[in-house]
């Protein structure tokens, strides 16, 4: 039953299909990375704290744009400089 196992392209481990998320694309039934590796890449990309921080920044930018549109471009360039 070679169909029930799949090699993860990230960690190289041979794992059961239950260790992979299903892929919505019709030509690929499962993601090429296992669930464990998928979680790792997502965490390293943007942590929950970073996501909240980014949402607060966006809210601040919106309120700046409403009050003083001329300051909006300046705030954007400041935000980009911080990153
Ligand atoms: Zn993996």
Image (cartoon, rainbow, N blue to C red):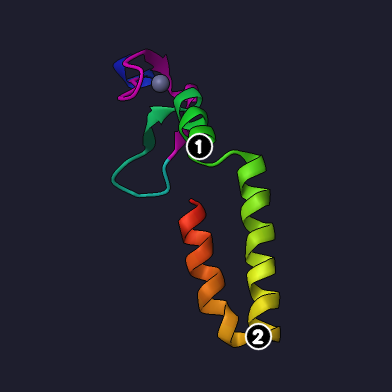
Q: Secondary structure at mark 2?
A: loop
CB at disc 2 and ligand 1 closer than 8 Å: no
Which residue is painted at 32% across and 41% down in the image?
Answer: 28
Which residue is painted at 69% across and 67% down in the image?
Answer: 59
> Left of 61 or right of it: where is 22?
left
Give the image quadrant in which the ligand numbered 1 is located.
top left
Image coordinates of residue 27 in percent, x first then y, are 28, 46
Q: Is residue 20 magenta?
A: yes
> Left of 9 or right of it: where is 41?
right
- Give whichever of 41, 17 is nearer the camera: 41
Boundaries of the magenta span: 7-22
For label 2, the crowd category at 10 Å Cα-Cα, with few meaning under 14, some 14 to 19 and many 20 or more, is few
Label 2 sits on residue: 68
> Left of 57 or right of it: where is 31?
left
The quarter in which the N terminus is drawn is: top left
Label 1 sits on residue: 42
């Amino acid at each position: 039953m070679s169909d029930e196992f799949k090699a993860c392209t990230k960690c190289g481990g041979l794992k059961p299909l239950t260790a992979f998320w299903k892929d919505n694309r019709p030509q690929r039934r499962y993601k090429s990375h296992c669930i464990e590796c998928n979680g790792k890449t997502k965490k390293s990309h943007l942590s929950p704290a970073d996501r909240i921080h980014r949402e607060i920044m966006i809210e601040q930018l919106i309120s700046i744009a409403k009050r003083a549109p001329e300051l909006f471009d300046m705030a954007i360039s400041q935000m980009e400089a911080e990153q």
